Image (tube, rainbow, N blue to C red):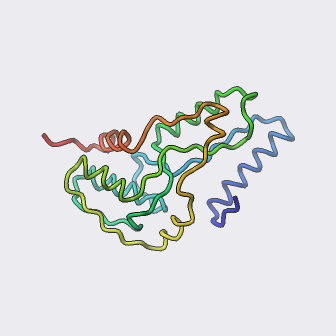
Amino acid sequence: MMPTSMYGITKVAGELLGAYAAAKQNVDFRGLRFPGLLNTAPPGGGSSDFANLMYFAAAAGKHEVEVFCRPDTRIPFMYMPDAVKAIIEVAQAPAARLTRRTYNVAAMSPSAADIASALRARVGRFDVKYVPDFRQAILDSWPRALEDSPARADWDWKPTWDLESMTDDLLAQLGWEKSA
């Protein structure tokens, strides 16, 4: 991969430095490449934050939200508990089983419309206005899904959460209560 953003460049640089330390200094370096992580942290303006904007709006009881992407925008996501699980599992994996220093880990790749539909099924009326901005071009440059078969083969990686279970839990974590 040849990233063009400073964010991506520094990630790859860190991975290369870790691989160098492993090869030359006998350091047990293990790295993970995560998809967009969904959690209870407020949106901060990043490209994947269109999803958090929707979850935070729905949990706050808002019936509409504006997001900066198209409804067909599809990028990889993971719920934070799965990210923590992946970190623990790769750290505990026997070194002899690992075939690389850095692994992709994947979970789900819903579209913006899929997320809106999952929220609507739980909260009722929930309208999303799609107004793509400069971040749409960034989102369009991302893969639609991450290939994580080496993690699945080497240390038995498997996510726990899917869109439906994550939506139920994340709404609850954000304080939303289902009306009677």
The image shows residue 73 at horizontal and vertical percentages of: 44, 62
The image shows residue 94 at horizontal and vertical percentages of: 70, 26
Q: Is 127 placed above or below 104 here?
A: below
Which residue corresponds to the image point at 54% horizontal and 44% vertical from the top-left?
A: 106
Which residue corresponds to the image point at 32% horizontal and 53% vertical from the top-left?
A: 56
Which residue corresponds to the image point at 50% horizontal and 52% vertical from the top-left?
A: 76
Out of 129 and 71, give the one closest to the viewer: 71
The image shows residue 79 at horizontal and vertical percentages of: 45, 43
The image shows residue 142 at horizontal and vertical percentages of: 56, 61
Quadrant (top left, top right, bottom left, bottom right) of the N terminus: bottom right
Q: Quadrant of residue 112?
A: bottom left
Quadrant (top left, top right, bottom left, bottom right) of the C terminus: top left
Residue 105 as seen in the image, left or right of residue 67: right
Q: Is 82 placed above or below 35 here?
A: above
Which residue corresponds to the image point at 20% horizontal and 42% vertical from the top-left?
A: 178
Numbered-mark total = 0
Q: Is 144 placed above or below 18 here?
A: below
Q: Quadrant of residue 25?
A: top right
Residue that protrudes farthest toward the left in the picture: 180
